[in-house]
Amino acid sequence: MSRSNIVVPAAKEAMNKFKMEAANEVGVTLKQGYNGDLTSKQAGSIGGQMVKKMIESYENSVK
């Protein structure tokens, strides 16, 4: 199974929205569809922001 496959298909739109929000927060402009022109630094900053927000969400839910 590819790492980019979403286990719950209904979550795809929510994940796309989450990715767009994270990109906006770190100042990276994403377009709908293919974004293969991003640098590794830009893509990494988006992923890092997403992980940071997921950890914060988890920590807030266990308080």
Image (spheres, helix red, strand yellow):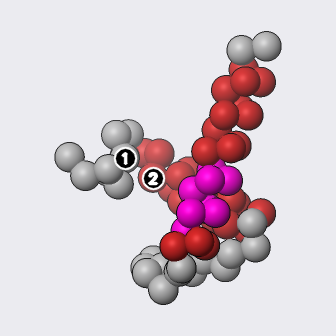
Q: Is residue 59 left or right of residue 7?
A: right
Q: In this orientation, does residue 17 appear? A: no
Could you tell me which residue is drawn at 56 percent across and 51 percent down? 14
**Location of residue 47 (image quadrant):** bottom right
Which secondary structure is most common in the magenta stretch? helix
Residues shaded magenta: 43-50
What is the x, y in percent for residue 23? Answer: 67, 66
- In the picture, the disc for residue 31 is none
Out of 40 and 13, give the one closest to the viewer. Answer: 40
- In the picture, the disc for residue 12 is 2
Compared with 26, 28 (above or below) is below
User: Few, some or many C-alpha atoms within 10 Å of disc 2 (few <14, some 14-19, many ≥20)?
Assistant: few
Q: Are marks 2 and 1 in contact (CB under 8 Å)?
A: yes
Confirm whether the magenta stretch covers residue 57. no
Q: Residue furthest top?
A: 63
- In the picture, the disc for residue 6 is 1
Q: Is residue 40 left or right of residue 57?
A: left
Q: Does label 2 or label 1 sit earlier along the sequence?
A: 1
What residue type is disc 2 on?
A: Lys
What is the x, y in percent for residue 20? Answer: 64, 65
